Image (cartoon, rainbow, N blue to C red):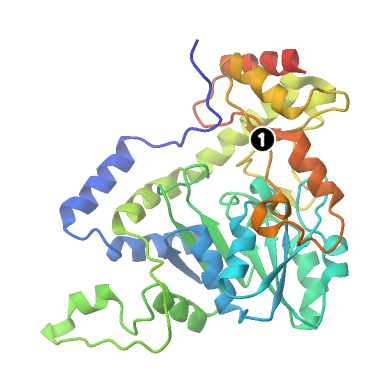
Amino acid sequence: MSTIPVMIPWLGEEEARAAADAVRSGWVAQGPRVAEFERAFAEAVGVPHAVAVSSCTTALHLALIGAGVGPGDEVVVPSFSFIATANAVTYVGATPVFADVDPAGGNLTPETVAPLLTDRTRAVIAVDQGGVPVDLDAIEELVRPRGIAVVEDAACAAGSVYRGRPAGAGADIAAFSFHPRKLLTTGEGGMVTCRDGELAARLRRLREHGMSVSAAERHSGAGGAAVLETYDEIGFNHRMTDVQAAIGLVQLGKLPAMVARRRELASAYRELLGPELGGRLVGDPAHGTSNFQSLWLLLPEGAPERGQVLASLAAEGVSARRGIMAAHLEAPYKGAARVPLPVTELLTSRTLILPLYHSLTGEQQERVVRALKRAL
């Protein structure tokens, strides 16, 4: 019996050819394909500037630096998120302050953020958890009068829609992921999007050790003249390669089809699971639509412990996963929560992620649902 995986990236010959062409070009580090990918991604999201980097974690790192966050500052974050969200805050010497989330979409709300704001709060990281768009306008309305920046962690949200526009379009600064678990993948990789041209230029310098002139510009040597760079602030090695960008350009063209297929599959799951279980699947919020990067199910009351359910599924060849983690329960942040986080702890302990990928068949979905109902 073949195993049904939780996720398979939609990669094929077109991506293979694009990567091979980049290798054959002789330019495999950050170069012209990265610049092309940045332009195409900015256009797709509807923002003026996009800066390609090595991961969403490094994108968040640069975004926080760009927002002026540093030692002594506090940043409100959801605990209900991959630990990289909190880690990026610690990278800049600030303190992550964990907020609870809404039970339907797993995102921050003004009500969960407001009690945690202090004179030291410099920013809020608003996550589009699992592709469900956060209500960004509501959070910005709360914090902007206080001079607090909002960084949108859109790691999972390429292709999601918020108030009629692509997720990330309304943010002053946002971070995206191209990890293989995401819809659009470059293997590893990320993107920072922003509205401010000067900030984008600074982030491009920071991703490349703080160089005043990029490696691509130095090697192009306009007119044969030597181009000498300077290093005006401490930077980082957060670059994307042209091989990754070549794959990303192909993937970007597939994104609308990816989203449409995943939404179709999510709807089919809801119907197959029936009224009770289907109603426990994560869904669209009132203010937008999800790309269903992760389709998570809240286990009903009286169901077996989640580990037992996952083991039962695995025995039938279905590879589900535990729900989104809670950072405040992990060793680096144990005991750091300042307020109770009951919704976070419920969702992280009682949700599981169902298999969902472009090539998943109707027959495989039926097999997943039969196995799940037996496990419950």
On screen, residue 2 above or below 15: above
The structure residue drawn at horizontal position 77% and vertical position 53%, both measured from the top left corner, is: 287
Number of numbered callouts drawn: 1
208 relative to 292 in the view: left or right: left
Q: Position of residue 270 (x, y in %)?
A: 73, 26
248 relative to 48 in the view: left or right: left
On screen, residue 40 above or below 214: above
Answer yes or no: is residue 47 visible. Answer: no
239 relative to 288 in the view: left or right: left
Q: Position of residue 83 (x, y in %)?
A: 62, 54
On screen, residue 194 above or below 16: below
**Element type at marker 1?**
strand
The structure residue drawn at horizontal position 11% and vertical position 83%, both measured from the top left corner, is: 224
Callout 1 crowding tier (Cα within 10 Å): few <14, some 14–19, many ≥20: some
Q: Which residue is mark 1?
A: 322
Q: Position of residue 232 (x, y in %)?
A: 39, 89
Answer yes or no: is residue 14 visible. Answer: yes
On screen, residue 52 above or below 80: below
The structure residue drawn at horizontal position 35% and vertical position 48%, both measured from the top left corner, is: 247
The structure residue drawn at horizontal position 88% and vertical position 68%, both measured from the top left corner, is: 115
